[in-house]
Image (spheres, rainbow, N blue to C red):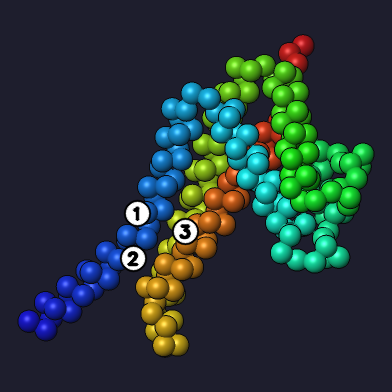
Amino acid sequence: KRVESHNFEIRKHLLEYDNVMNKQREVIYDERRKVLFGENLKEYIYEIMEEVLDEALDRYVNEKTSADNWDFEGLRQYLDSRFAIKTKDLKLEEMRPEEILDILTERLKAAYEDKEKELSPEMARHLEKMILLQVVDSRWKDHLYAMDSLREGIGLRAYGQRDPLIEYQHEGYNMFMDMIGRIKEEAIEYLFKIKAVKET
């Protein structure tokens, strides 16, 4: 009876760990379906763009911190290196964060419209799909390895009087959210850096 009860506890515990991964898998598969069968990916790209900019502003000009700590130069370098967006003509230092977000969103969308003209709308839609799927799959694969490593080492937390499952859920969630952020940022970066090659 004791062995049976022990085995049941192990199975229950494994299921609880698997539940964490299953929830994450559902989110990722849902994302893939949206990309594969989405009619208008351009609108979706614009949504991602705004989220990426929002994240960047949180990093460089966070309203929760003192304006003295805002890093406008860091923001400019980030926009230039990631999306080749120049902002020297903008007096960012004189704007509120929400104004900065609005003007940068407009600028990124305008640059993306130019990119679409350069590539052709059909090619742009095709590339959106290919790049999003490739980035999602690649990052998800890395995340699965990371979650395996986390699961292997998490039992040691019990020695520190912490519940390994709660630790796994908490860290797994943080890792998952980091991965989602990286997927969005990388996908937008690749789309902006892609160039049309003229046939000779």
Picture disc at residue 180:
none
**Could you tell me how far apart the alpha carbons at marks 3 and 1 are, in whole angstroms?**
15 Å
Q: Closer to the camera: disc 3 or disc 1? A: 1
Residue 22 - label: 1
The x, y position of residue 161, in whole percent, is 41, 88
140 versus 19 height, above or below: above
- Residue depicted at 46% across the width and 64% down the height: 172
Per the model, the C-alpha gap separating discs 1 and 2 is: 9 Å
Image quarter where the C terminus lies is: top right
Residue occupied by mark 2: 17
| Location of the N terminus (image quadrant) | bottom left
Quarter of the image for residue 70 reads bottom right
Is disc 3 placed on a helix, strand or loop? helix
Residue 198 in sight: yes
Badge 3 density bin: few <14, some 14–19, many ≥20, Cα 10 Å:
few
Query: Could you say where residue 16 lies in the image, as x and y percent from the top left?
Result: 30, 66
Instruction: For marks 3 and 2, give the CA distance.
Output: 15 Å
Q: Residues within 10 Å of mark 2 (few under 14, many from 20)?
A: some
Ranked by sequence position, the earlier of labels 1 and 2 is 2
Q: Which residue is mark 3?
A: 145
The residue depicted at 45 percent of the width and 56 percent of the height is 144
Mark 2, secondary structure of its residue: helix
Neighbours of disc 1 within 10 Å: few (<14), some (14-19), many (20+) = few
Q: Earlier in the sequence, mark 3 or mark 2?
A: 2
**x and y percentages locating residue 74 in the rendered image:** 83, 55
The residue lying toward the viewer, choosing from 45 and 12, is 45
- Residue at image location 42% in from the left, 35% down from the top: 33
| Type of amino acid under label 2 | Tyr
